[in-house]
Every structure is written in structure tokens, then in C-alpha cells.
């Protein structure tokens, strides 16, 4: 096998390698953009909703604990 034949045999693999490299590069860029979109969504929508609902839950629990304390105080002497 000559050097010229060896080069021709490698050419299809080189083209496939370049094509795969380009596709992987595009995919990596798309994943990076999607990651940024998800992070922005979490920070702008999910985190504030969790904070809002968490504070409501704490207020509801505090109200119920206050009622329980009143009940215990009323029934202490019985």
C-alpha cells in the first residue's frame, strides 16, 4: 500500500471526524443555552414561588401553634 492510498483511506474518517466534531460543538452550545434558560427560569419563577409559599406555610403553622397554646392554657387547670 502506498502513501497515496493510505491518505485516501484516512480521508473518509477525517471527514466523519470533522462532521462529528461540528455536531458535538453545536450540541454543546445548545445545551449551554438551555442550561442558562433553566437557571434563569428557576431564579425568576421557582425560587420566588417557594419563598412565597414557605412564608405562608410558616404563618399558618404559627397560627395553629398559637391556637394550640391557647387550648393548652385553658385546659391546664382541669
Image (cartoon, grey):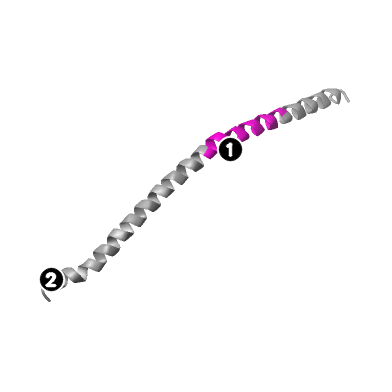
**Residues marked 2 and 1 touching at CB (< 8 Å):** no
- Residue 18 rendering spot, x and y as whole percentages: 28, 59
Drawn side of residue 65 relative to residue 51, left or right: right
What residue is pinned by disc 1? Answer: 46
Q: Are there few (<14), some (14-19), or many (20+) residues within 10 Å of tag 2? A: few
Q: Secondary structure at mark 1?
A: helix
- Residue 10 rendering spot, x and y as whole percentages: 21, 68
- Region rendered in magenta: 41-59
Q: Is residue 56 magenta?
A: yes
Front-lying residue, 20 or 69: 20
Front-lying residue, 65 or 5: 5
| Residue 76 higher or lower than 33, as above or below | above
Q: Secondary structure at mark 2?
A: helix
Per the rendering, the mark at residue 4 is: 2
Q: Quadrant of the C terminus?
A: top right
* Marks 2 and 1, how far apart at CA: 61 Å
Amino acid at each position: 500500500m502506498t502513501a497515496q492510498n493510505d491518505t485516501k483511506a484516512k480521508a473518509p474518517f477525517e471527514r466523519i471526524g470533522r462532521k462529528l466534531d461540528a455536531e458535538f460543538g453545536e450540541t454543546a452550545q445548545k445545551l449551554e443555552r438551555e442550561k442558562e434558560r433553566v437557571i434563569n427560569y428557576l431564579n425568576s419563577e421557582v425560587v420566588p414561588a417557594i419563598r412565597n409559599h414557605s412564608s405562608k406555610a410558616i404563618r399558618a403553622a404559627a397560627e395553629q401553634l398559637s391556637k394550640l397554646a391557647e387550648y393548652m392554657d385553658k385546659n391546664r387547670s382541669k
